[in-house]
Each structure stands twice: as structure tokens, then as C-alpha cells.
Image (spheres, rainbow, N blue to C red):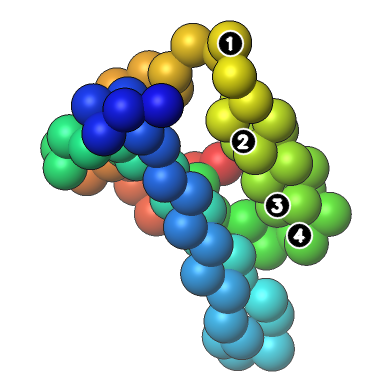
Amino acid sequence: MSADDSRVIVVRAWRDCGRTIIRVLTGTRNARAGEQRVFSDVDTACAQIAALIKDLEPGTPPIRSVDARGYPEGTG
């Protein structure tokens, strides 16, 4: 994998008003390309993270480029 097709997954989790919030961010070398999803259910977030990690295996196409700023909070 070269620097041009590298991908990153970032997971942030915190407690807010008695509930767990999990934000999963994915991106590529292009700072404008990326995707974000926000979950309050741990099992759903883990399933999404597992799918993203599986996509990192050799031979899978890169994630599609999406402007993450276009996603409202709470989507996913």
C-alpha cells in the first residue's frame, strides 16, 4: 500500500448525559475525503468498525471519497 492509497480509521468514544457516544471517522490521504458515523449503540459501532477493518485487507478497493463536512451529527 502506498501513501497515495493509504486509509485511516479513527474511533473516539465518550460519555455524555449518561450515554456512550462513539464516533467513527475514516479517511484517505486527501484531507477532504472521509466519512464519519456517530453511534450510541456499542454493538452497532463494533460491527461497523469490524467491516471497516476488513476493508483494509489487500485486494479490496479504497473507500469512496466523501466530504465528511456534509454529514449532519447523529447520522450512521
Residue named by callout 2 = 52
Mark 1 vs 3, N-terminal side? 3
Q: Secondary structure at mark 1?
A: loop
Quarter the N terminus occupies: top left
Cβ atoms under marks 1 and 2 closer than 8 Å: no
Mark 4 vs 1, N-terminal side? 4
Q: Position of residue 69 (x, y in %)?
A: 22, 44
Q: Nearer the viewer, mark 3 or mark 2?
A: 2
Mark 1 vs 2, N-terminal side? 2
Q: Position of residue 19 (x, y in %)?
A: 69, 80
Residue named by callout 4 = 41
Residue named by callout 3 = 45
| Residue 17 visible in the shown view | yes
Q: Nearer the viewer, mark 4 or mark 3?
A: 3
Q: Is residue 50 left or right of residue 26?
A: right
Q: Quadrant of residue 13?
A: bottom right
Give how far apart the Cα atoms at labels 3 and 2 are.
Answer: 11 Å
| Residue 67 visible in the shown view | no
Quarter the C terminus occupies: top right
Q: Quadrant of residue 65?
A: top left
Badge 3 amino acid: Ala
Q: Secondary structure at mark 4?
A: loop
Mark 2 vs 4, N-terminal side? 4
Mark 3 vs 2, N-terminal side? 3
